[in-house]
Image (cartoon, rainbow, N blue to C red):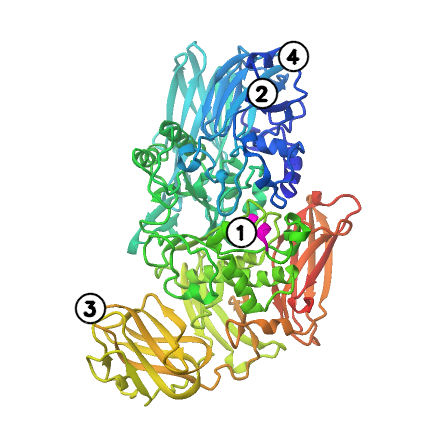
């Protein structure tokens, strides 16, 4: 383990849980507490459990256990297994060694600060099932990885001396999908992570002691409603439990901040061993009406303001129990207008931009503040939603970080596609209720989802729906199936030409509405940089591509990612790589292109009828070459920067299919008096002024506003006029009516799908587009094809969702004599009928442009400040960017300034491409390295990367990282290397 081991050793050195610090007297029993000694051993190697509690028991031959973690992780950390991240080590592990029950044993003492009458032993999660014993007595069983355990050990625990805790952990039942559920279903392997020995069984969440009085509070729940955004009505529900046989009188004090809102409630008496249900609302307490509240907003729409509700339960003069609940004031609402799901918060629609999160880490080694890093990176990409795919992330810190950074959560339960029930449906249902109760206070929860790409099978179908209605009061939307019912399916997951994402509609691999809609999964392979690649790949397997790459999911194991196509496209667009470093470098350009286009394609159609896109996937759980934006080591790949560029809340973007430029406003404010500008530059940095444009534009809340079209095709010449036409059949008019220049004449075919018509240009011509004018008998699905002999045809364009009327279609310049519309599927009961068939061509449409040129879009506010800037690269052949490899080298000036502030290193740098430079500095890659080890400094937060600098242009770079990532005598070293300077 590389990165995550660092986090475990540093971040888990906190013995009190931050969320509980002010709530109760807590003592962690996790293995980071030096006073707790955890060991683990297979159950089949232990003859008698009772012997484990004997004084002086010798556990020297047991393995030191990591808690919370999995059994397999403990063996890895003990050095008993080779690094599972490297090579194919994890595939070589003997599964039988771990796919069985294990016994954990710990010794601990009770701290002197535990002075109240009740001592509790608490568990937050065991995968999959745990039997719990203390000092020889069986306390009970936890059945399911989300079931909490709270055991009263007051009469069992020894106040002086050691206590012995034993937990027998049983693995999930196979097959995991869905028989073993509730569990981490991907533990048996997926197309992005290997089979995990032991199926991630172990004590997988926190263990701790707590000390309280006789009365305790269970499952406090703060609900918020907004009659208007200027008034919030709160309701607080909870259970107050008397844990003794004696009648107890109690008082509850409530404090809400900000605002220092306080009130008390005399609870009267509570009978012994009974529970009182409390419902505090505005009808009883006027303090629960908050005027002008600080609302919780998702990222980009406002601040994610949070409140705290402190509950103090007293018996007489003594405080029996304290609890702090964090919550956000918000109101979700939903509609399915046009059969598309839309999510609104506080009365405003939110265009969903984000990704799927499979596992935090494939061995569950992500803990503590590492979640803050991962979610912060999503916020930096301007995302506003994460899908907790299959409910695979269960840690509190995940939800806390989403609350903090304004990231909505689409939260799945643990069912996948197959119409198979869990082996124990009652354990599943109990865990579902536990999950809802555990996370419902988090304002980030936006959608509950029952099943991934399938419907829950009865009786879970109704149980889940009722659970949410009962325990979340219907405050959030319940979606039974993740890719249907007002959604536009899931997939595809392979690599496509960036223009494809702008064409109606990017195909889905599964059922769902034929629309942009809300796509909950779509993605591509994302290859890592060389520096990361060599961390997990043996030196002799680096190049060329081989089976070891497949073990890290660039091959048949991840066939959905179309790695063969991904590799082929790199060669076609950027030139055949000469080695692994060249391959990785070129892959980042493809990563930027593809991922930026995915988001911008959906944004281009915002509310018409697109409502959001979640890529598959947004973070990495295992060192691989698929489904990620930042990689396993926190290197921010090209995919990260493509997504970040596209998702800027106030954004200017280029549609690479039709060359339109739009202003995208995914904020909660109107922005008036903006200036939108496009400038086209050749590779030498000189502007092509005839293509430039500048307009004033107003951008209103939640709109995609047309600014202008870049006139790459303004001088189109129709070379089909008067030319001969041949058709497969004719029922109306004549074929030549579509090239006669008369808009009142038309040709129509017989009423069959497979019909065609082609124009004979008379000689070979340069062709780059067609103009079709369909009558009511239109083509729903058709191809544009070209040929030199009218026998062998080449596809240059495919339309999946054609419509009536005028359609200008452009493709790369190609030489052809014949141009054909090949009908595939009619849009009516008639045949195909065209008023006109134009062919655009003759001369090259790119006159005055170098083989590679750059589209620079700039958006300024009404005071002239730049609010967004994007630079795209474009080729005269739009599938060929090999001319980038011939860009002259440039000597950039880099001026860094490094300071320490509040436990962080802050690096401020100015990167300049001198005015005398021979070329544009393309895709400048900024990195930080350790001055001594030469290793990259990760994780780090950067404001920009892979940027392009024109001649004489500078970029201000800001980088921050934790001071703990450098040791004494080590310094950060900044490099800025443009693609121009790649080894030739």
For the residues labelled 1 and 2, the Cα–Cα distance comes to: 41 Å
Label 3, on which residue?
829
Residue 943 locus on image (x, y percent): 61, 57
Q: Give the quarter of the figure containing the C terminus.
A: bottom right
- Give the camera-side residue of 299 and 559: 559
Reading the chain from its start, which is encountered first: label 2 or label 3? 2
Reading the chain from its start, which is encountered first: label 4 or label 1? 4
Residue 301 in view in this figure: no
Q: Give the quarter of the figure containing the N terminus.
A: top right
Q: Which of marks 4 and 3 is in front?
A: 3
Label 1, on which residue?
628
- Give the camera-side residue of 776 and 265: 776
For the residues labelled 1 and 3, the Cα–Cα distance comes to: 45 Å
Reading the chain from its start, which is encountered first: label 1 or label 2? 2
Q: To which quarter of the image does residue 662 belong?
A: bottom left
For the residues labelled 4 and 1, the Cα–Cα distance comes to: 49 Å
Indicate the secondary structure of the residue bearing disc 3: loop
For the residues labelled 4 and 3, the Cα–Cα distance comes to: 87 Å
Residue 618 locus on image (x, y percent): 51, 50
**Would you place residue 343 above or below residue 259 in this image?**
below
Q: Which of marks 2 and 3 is in front?
A: 2
Read off the magenta span.
546-555
Q: Which of marks 4 and 2 is in front?
A: 2
Label 2, on which residue?
45
- Give the camera-side residue of 936 and 440: 936
Indicate the secondary structure of the residue bearing disc 4: loop
For the residues labelled 2 and 3, the Cα–Cα distance comes to: 74 Å
Contact, mark 4 vs mark 1 (Cβ under 8 Å): no
Label 4, on which residue?
161
């Amino acid at each position: 383990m590389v990165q995550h081991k660092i986090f475990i050793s540093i971040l888990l050195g906190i013995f009190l849980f931050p969320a509980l610090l002010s709530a109760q007297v807590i003592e962690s029993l996790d293995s980071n507490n030096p006073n707790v000694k955890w060991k683990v051993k297979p159950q089949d190697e232990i003859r008698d459990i009772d012997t484990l509690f004997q004084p002086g028991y010798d556990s020297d031959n047991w393995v030191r256990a990591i808690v919370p973690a999995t059994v397999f992780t403990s063996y890895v950390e003990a050095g008993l297994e080779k690094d599972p991240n490297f090579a194919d080590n994890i595939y070589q592990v003997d599964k039988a060694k771990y796919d069985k029950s294990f016994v954990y044993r710990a010794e601990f003492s009770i701290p002197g600060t535990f002075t109240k009458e009740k001592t509790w032993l608490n568990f937050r999660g065991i995968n999959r099932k745990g039997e719990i014993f203390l000092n020889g007595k069986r306390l009970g069983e936890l059945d399911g990885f989300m079931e909490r355990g709270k055991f009263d050990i007051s009469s069992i625990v020894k106040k002086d001396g050691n206590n012995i805790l034993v937990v027998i952990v049983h693995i999930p039942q196979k097959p995991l999908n869905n028989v073993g559920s509730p569990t981490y279903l991907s533990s048996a392997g997926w197309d992005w992570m290997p089979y995990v020995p032991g199926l991630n069984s172990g004590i997988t969440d926190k263990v701790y002691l707590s000390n309280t009085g006789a009365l305790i509070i269970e499952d406090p729940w703060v609900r918020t409603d907004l009659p208007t955004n200027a008034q919030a009505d709160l309701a607080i529900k909870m259970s107050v439990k008397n844990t003794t046989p004696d009648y107890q009188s109690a008082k509850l004090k409530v404090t809400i901040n900000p605002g220092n809102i306080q009130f008390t409630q005399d609870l009267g008496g509570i009978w012994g061993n009974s529970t009182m249900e409390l419902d505090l609302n505005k009808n009883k307490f006027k303090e629960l009406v908050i005027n002008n509240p600080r609302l919780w907003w998702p990222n980009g729409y406002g601040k994610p303001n949070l409140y705290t509700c402190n509950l103090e339960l007293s018996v007489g003069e003594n405080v029996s129990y304290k609890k702090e609940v964090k919550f956000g004031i918000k109101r979700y609402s939903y509609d399915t207008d046009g059969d598309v799901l839309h999510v609104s918060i506080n009365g405003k629609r939110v265009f969903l931009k984000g990704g799927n999160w499979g596992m935090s880490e494939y061995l569950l080694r992500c803990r503590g503040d590492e979640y803050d890093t991962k979610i912060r990176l999503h916020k930096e990409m301007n995302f506003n939603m994460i899908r907790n795919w299959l409910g695979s992330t269960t840690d509190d810190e995940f939800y806390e970080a989403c609350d903090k950074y304004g990231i909505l959560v689409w939260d799945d339960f643990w069912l996948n596609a197959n119409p198979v029930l869990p082996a124990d449906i009652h354990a599943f249902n109990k865990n579902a209720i536990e999950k809802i109760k555990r996370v419902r206070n988090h304002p980030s929860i936006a959608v509950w989802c029952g099943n991934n790409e399938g419907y829950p099978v009865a009786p879970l179908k109704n149980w889940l729906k009722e659970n949410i209605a009962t325990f979340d009061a219907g405050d959030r939307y319940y979606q039974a199936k993740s890719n249907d019912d007002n959604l536009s399916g899931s997939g595809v997951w392979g690599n496509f030409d960036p223009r494809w994402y702008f064409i109606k509609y990017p195909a889905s691999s599964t059922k769902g509405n034929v629309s942009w809609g809300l796509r909950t999964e779509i993605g591509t392979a994302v290859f890592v940089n060389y520096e990361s690649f060599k961390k997990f790949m043996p030196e002799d397997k680096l190049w060329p591509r081989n089976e070891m790459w497949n073990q890290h999911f660039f091959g048949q194991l991840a066939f959905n990612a179309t790695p063969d196509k991904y590799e082929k496209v790199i060669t076609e667009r950027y030139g055949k790589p000469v080695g692994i470093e060249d391959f990785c470098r070129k892959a980042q350009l493809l990563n930027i292109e593809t991922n930026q286009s995915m988001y911008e394609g959906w944004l281009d159609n915002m509310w018409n009828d697109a409502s959001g896109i979640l890529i598959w996937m947004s973070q990495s759980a295992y060192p691989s070459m698929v489904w990620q934006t930042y990689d396993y080591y926190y290197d921010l790949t090209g995919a990260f920067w493509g997504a970040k560029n596209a998702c800027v809340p106030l954004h200017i973007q280029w549609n690479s299919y039709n060359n339109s430029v739009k202003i995208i406003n995914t904020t909660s404010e109107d922005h008036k008096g903006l200036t939108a500008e496009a400038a086209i530059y050749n590779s030498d940095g000189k502007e092509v002024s005839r293509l430039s444009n500048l307009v004033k534009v107003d951008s209103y809340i939640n709109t995609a506003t047309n600014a202008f079209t870049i006139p790459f095709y303004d001088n189109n010449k129709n070379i089909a006029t008067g030319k001969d036409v041949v058709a497969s059949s004719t029922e109306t008019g004549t074929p030549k009516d579509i090239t006669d220049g008369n808009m009142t004449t038309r040709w129509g075919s017989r009423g069959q799908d497979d019909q065609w018509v082609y124009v004979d240009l008379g000689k070979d011509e340069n062709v780059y587009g067609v103009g079709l004018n369909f009558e009511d008998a239109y083509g729903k699905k058709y191809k544009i094809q070209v040929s030199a002999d009218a026998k062998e045809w080449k596809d240059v364009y495919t339309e999946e969702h054609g419509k009536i009327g005028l359609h200008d279609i452009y493709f790369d310049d190609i030489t052809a004599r014949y141009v054909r519309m090949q009908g595939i599927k009619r849009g009516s009961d008639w045949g195909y009928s065209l008023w006109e068939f134009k062919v655009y061509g003759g001369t090259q449409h790119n006159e005055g442009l170098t083989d590679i040129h750059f589209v620079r879009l700039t958006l300024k506010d009404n005071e002239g400040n730049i609010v967004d800037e994007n630079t795209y690269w474009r080729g005269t052949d739009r599938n060929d960017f090999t001319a980038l490899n011939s860009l002259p080298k440039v000597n950039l000036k880099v001026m860094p300034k490094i300071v320490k502030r509040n436990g962080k290193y802050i690096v401020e740098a100015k990167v300049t491409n001198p005015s005398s430079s021979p070329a544009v500095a393309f895709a400048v890659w900024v990195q930080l390295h350790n001055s001594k080890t030469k290793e990259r400094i990760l994780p780090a937060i950067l404001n920009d990367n892979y940027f392009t600098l024109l001649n004489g242009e500078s970029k201000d770079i800001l980088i921050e990282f934790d001071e703990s990532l450098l040791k004494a005598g080590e310094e950060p070293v900044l490099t800025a290397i443009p693609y121009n300077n790649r080894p030739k």
